[in-house]
Image (tube, rainbow, N blue to C red):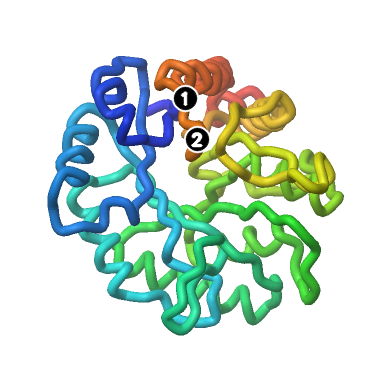
Amino acid sequence: MRPSAGIGFKAEHCSDAVECIASGLWFEVHAENYMVEGGPRLAMLETLRSAHPVSLHGVGLSLAADADPDMRHVARLKMLVDRFEPFVVSEHLAWSAWRGVYNPGLLPFPRTRSALDRVVANVMRVQEALGRAILIENPALYMPLDGHQLAETEFLDELVRQSGCGLLIDVNNVYVSANNLGFSAQAYLESIPGAAIGEIHLAGHAADMRYGESLLIDTHDAPVCEAVWGLYEGLIDRVGPRPTLIERDDNIPLFAELRRERDRAHAVLTSAPSLECREAAHV
């Protein structure tokens, strides 16, 4: 099936989402919001899943922590995977929990060889428990961190090669990190192994209230900016169509506004030649 564009699901859009008949439409849900025994949340997700494909996007596995994953959390995730059969399961290259303390943010870490070994082991353990490969999302970064031994793209490349996972490339995260740390977003995207990209995220950001445009924050509370759209179109031109999600987690607009952004991404995907056609053109 040709890759298509989706929308991050919000409960207030349930009726619109279920009734929408846009070609190829799918929805992403945050897994932790549905790790319950029953009740209206699961019933709502059942209704959504009966109408459209879904993906599960986790925020709580803390895969970059220097500790094993919480297997109780993984077990709850597996219950959702088995019940709703998402076409993609994804998580973040970050840590958020340590010795029973949970942080609300997705935190950075020094990209050392030992950290790579730990993340590879954690990803493989989760994949074994789920019985499937997962996608790992690149982070949004806000300040330099000492101790790196690997560039982020090198780290992701090694992670894919050693663990068998795929990548979820958040183009807005690349744009925000490049602005904040002073590197080229275009060069970053050109160095990502295209074959490993299983999904793409597009979202909005905001300038910091104190530092302005010199510090961008990955807020998910605004439309996708034109610079991010340009980076996205260049990425699709290089790697071919990939499932693409429009994310909005704050200042939630009407469903029709998200639908317009989704349709723009979908048009990029449908107009791009497939990877097979691209390869045949170069034979």
Please provide percent x and percent y for residue 90: 44, 52
Task: Bin the neighbour count of mark 2 within 10 Å (Cα to Cα): few under 14, some 14-19, many 20 and up.
Answer: many
Q: Nearer the viewer, residue 262 or 207?
A: 207
| Residue 244 in view in this figure | no
Residue 6 falls in which quadrant of the image? top left
Q: Which residue bears the numbered disc 2?
A: 248
| Residue 14 in view in this figure | yes
Cβ atoms at labels 2 and 1 below 8 Å apart: yes
Tag 1 secondary structure: loop
Q: Which residue bears the numbered disc 1?
A: 253
Q: Quadrant of the N terminus?
A: top left
Q: CA distance from mark 2 to mark 1?
A: 8 Å
Looking at the image, residue 23 sits to the left or right of residue 59; the answer is left
Looking at the image, residue 40 sits to the left or right of residue 167; the answer is left
Q: Is residue 146 above or below residue 237?
A: below
**Residue occupying the point 46% across, 71% down:** 102
